[in-house]
Amino acid sequence: MEKIFKKHSFQVGFSFGITSAIITTLGLMIGLFSGTHSEIAVIGGVLTIAIADAFSDALGIHIAEESEKIHTHKEVWESTFYTFVAKFLFAIIFIFPILLLELATGIWVNIIIGLLLLAVLSFIIAEGSKKERLNVVAEHLVVAVVVIFFANCAGQLISRYFG
């Protein structure tokens, strides 16, 4: 199992997939929640991200890895697979707080879960690359908070002008 974790294809697919799942799913959930306050819209959005965006991101990684012209055919497909699995599974995680809690509470729980997962992933990446851990974690969390902020603003504007 340790051998898999050290593979370039796993590291690329998993780190990209989980990061994309966290940022994209949180952004979509926050935007939909602030724009509609509809549980069905939020759940539908998360499921759409888990399926459509997981395939899209996997294809994006596939094409990016192919374009580098340094990876084997097998490595390209492994990166594709790991990206899809990570994106799909980590996006699906965000459905459970929505199903189990009141919608607003579920959204807040998801924000906390997402930021914690991103912080842990960032810490692991910083450790592996010998970079300053706090700087890497802070940089990634700031990006996530900016996405959350603007998604919330977009949802509110859409609600105000189209709701």
Image (spheres, grey):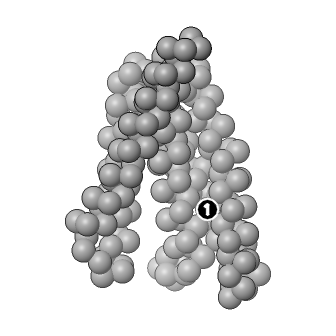
In the image, residue 53 above or below residue 148: below
Q: Secondary structure at mark 1?
A: helix
In the image, residue 13 above or below residue 101: below
Query: Pointer 1: residues within 10 angstroms few (<14), some, or many (20+)?
Result: many
Quadrant in the picture for residue 17: bottom right
Q: Is residue 8 left or right of residue 71?
A: left
Please state the total of marks drawn on the protein image.
1
Q: Is residue 13 left or right of residue 153?
A: right
Residue ID at (33%, 53%): 141
Could you tell me residue 1's position as x and y percent? 51, 76
Q: The C terminus appears in which quarter of the rendering?
A: top right
Residue ID at (33%, 73%): 126
- Could you tell me the amino acid type at mark 1? Thr
Query: In the displayed image of the protein, which residue is found farthest to the right?
Result: 73
Residue ID at (67%, 75%): 65
Q: Nearer the viewer, residue 106 or 135?
A: 135
Residue 153 in view here: yes
Residue 123 in view here: no
Could you tell me residue 28's position as x and y percent? 53, 36
Quadrant in the picture for residue 101: top left
Could you tell me residue 56's position as x and y percent? 70, 53
Q: Nearer the viewer, residue 156 or 111?
A: 156
- According to the picture, the residue beneath numbered tag 1 turns out to be 83
In the image, residue 152 above or below residue 102: below
Q: Is residue 114 left or right of residue 95?
A: left
